[in-house]
Image: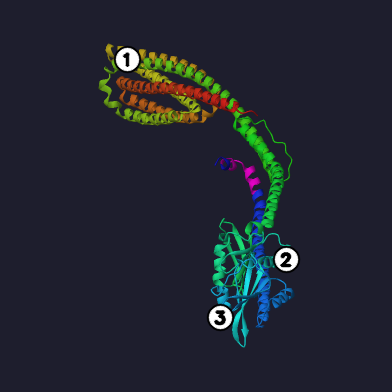
Amino acid sequence: MAFFDKLNRSLKKKLILIFLLITILPIIFLGLLNYNREKNLMKEQVFLFNKSLANSLGIKINHYAQEKLDQISYLASNDNLEQSDLLAFKKLYSGFEVLYVIGQNGHLKSVSEGFIKAKENYYSETWFQNAISGQSYISNYHKSEFINQPSIQFAVPIRANNKIIGVLGAEINLDIIKELITSSIDDIEYSDIYLIDSTGKPLYSKEGVTNIDSSQVQSFVKYILFKGKNGIKEYKNENGVDILGSYKFIKSLGWAIIVQQSSEEAFAEIRESLWNNLILVLVVGGVVTLISLKLTNSIFSPIDQLQINMKRISKGDYTQKINIERQDEIGELITSFNKLIAQQVDIVSDLKDSSMEISNTSKELFLSSKKSHKANQAVTDYIEDTVNSIQEITATNQEISTFSEETTASAQSGKEQVEEAITQITKINNFIIQANQASKELAEESKKIKEINNLIINITDQINLLSLNASIEAARASSTTKGSGTRRGRAGQGFSVVAEEIGSLAKETAKATAKINQTIKEVEAGIKNVLSMVSKGTQEADKGAKIIKVVAQSFDEIAAAIEETSLQLESVNMSTQQVSAKSEEVRDSAKDMNLLSKDVSNVSLQLEEMSSSLERITNKFEV
């Protein structure tokens, strides 16, 4: 499992393995295919050779046995055989160890030469019974009592006038049969040869051992003797060794000749070829491995370098570059990688520059917001003073209005005109509120300061105009009440005093407005883009001023019609109330601007922190 884990993590090893498999697998496959083909061919050749050899030996043994049987059958045609005849025949036909004649009653009548021991009667012997009954007989392997050696016995009937009068017997030494086999296999190295009699007893083996344990070929021998046929068979011997066997059944003898060879011996040359193929596979594998290593190194050397650089880049090091000149796909990959690194270096450099610009801008914005906050505080202080003065005027007007209740009804039409003026001023107020909402950004806050200052100017103009009108009306009241009594004369003088106070307050307000204008100019140096909104506010304020002028003209007409001072006093009271209300609005607006300037300051601080964080991030990269 560890090998496959390493293999899965290494593309180089995968390619080497693929090269090896592509090269070696066909060789192994062809080698195994050739081995199996040669093995089958060799098996056929072994079977064919063994079968041919078994047939040849079987025919040779059968021919020899049949020849000897024919020879003694020819001799048995003589019904009066003497020892001399047997000796002469033995000399004439080689191979016979001894010849003998047994009478019809089983007694020995003559023999070619002496023997160690003889029975008194052979009548009960199997070979005698077969021959006396008219059948030719060839025995299995036995130790002859005539020659006291392993031999094969032949027995044929002796006939006279178509009657069986005795048995002619002959003994052939088993070594003659062995010599027939040995002379035929002198140049054969691997085959094992067995001569088996009809009982399954081995008569001969290639090694010259006659007393062979029949269990070596027992199952095979039984099969041959039972079938009585020729053929080939693959089987295992008692040791479990694979055997390729061919057999020939010698019908005349009831024997069998077996020629066999172990698979190990038969396929020795093929196994040697298999080992040669294995050596070839190892040599080819080694050569392919060296070539694969050389090829993969040429392919993966830039890739390894690319991998190393990628690890450095992952740690923020953009200073490395791959210097490899290749015209193939890997060269294009390296070129693209170098371009990518160059682009990343440019991006990081731009980020560093941008972070510095953001840091500088945030600092400048913080300083501007502090200046704006100071200016707004000064405007707020001036507006507080104005509101207090207007409140004093309002209190005075309330005292005066107690003397002018009887003139209220006549001033109704003037009140309607004033209400229209209030509506226009309300529009201005709405516009200023819109400008206040838009002042969430620093530039728009400056616009609102301009609008508030214009509003103060307009209110100051209104106060001056009202003061002038009040002075005129006071003068008139003084001139028309000379004959009306001392009380109204004193009231006219008191109104004149109030008008002077209002004028004085208007002058102070104008001075304060001048100081506010100076502060606004300092703020406008950094926020020029807010002038358009202030201009719109100024236009609306001008419209309100014109309407107020119309109101003043209406008050002139009312004064000429009713000629009473009380209406003018009421008009002044209403005007002061309006101025007080507007002053309150201006004060609230100034407070809002002060809060917004603090928000801008906080935002600039946050921007400074963000730029510092961005700078720390970009400093991690080496470019």
Give yes or no for residue 477 being in the magenta stretch: no
Where, by quadrant of the figure, is residue 118 drawn?
Answer: bottom right
Q: x, y percentage for residue 277?
A: 69, 53
Q: Is residue 226 above or below residue 323?
A: below
Q: Is residue 71 above or below residue 376?
A: below
Q: x, y percentage for residue 438?
A: 45, 30
Placement of the N terminus among the 4 image quadrants = top right
Give yes or no for residue 11 being in the magenta stretch: yes
Q: x, y percentage for residue 196?
A: 60, 66
Q: Earlier in the sequence, mark 2 or mark 3?
A: 3
Q: Is residue 112 above or below residue 290?
A: below
Q: x, y percentage for residue 88?
A: 73, 76
What are the residue bounds of the magenta stretch?
Answer: 5-18
Question: CA separation, marks 2 and 3?
Answer: 37 Å
Q: Which residue ends up furthest to the bottom in the rendered image?
A: 161
In front: mark 2 or mark 3? 3
Residue indicated by mark 1: 396
Give whichever of 616, 410 is nearer the camera.
616
**Could you tell me what secondary structure mostly forms the magenta stretch?**
helix
Element at badge 2? helix
Residue type at the position of mark 2: Ser
Residue indicated by mark 3: 133
The numbered disc on residue 183 is 2
Give whichever of 467, 25 is nearer the camera.
25
Residue type at the position of mark 1: Thr
Element at badge 3? loop
Residue type at the position of mark 3: Ser
Give whichever of 15, 267 is nearer the camera.
267
Question: CA separation, marks 2 and 1?
Answer: 165 Å
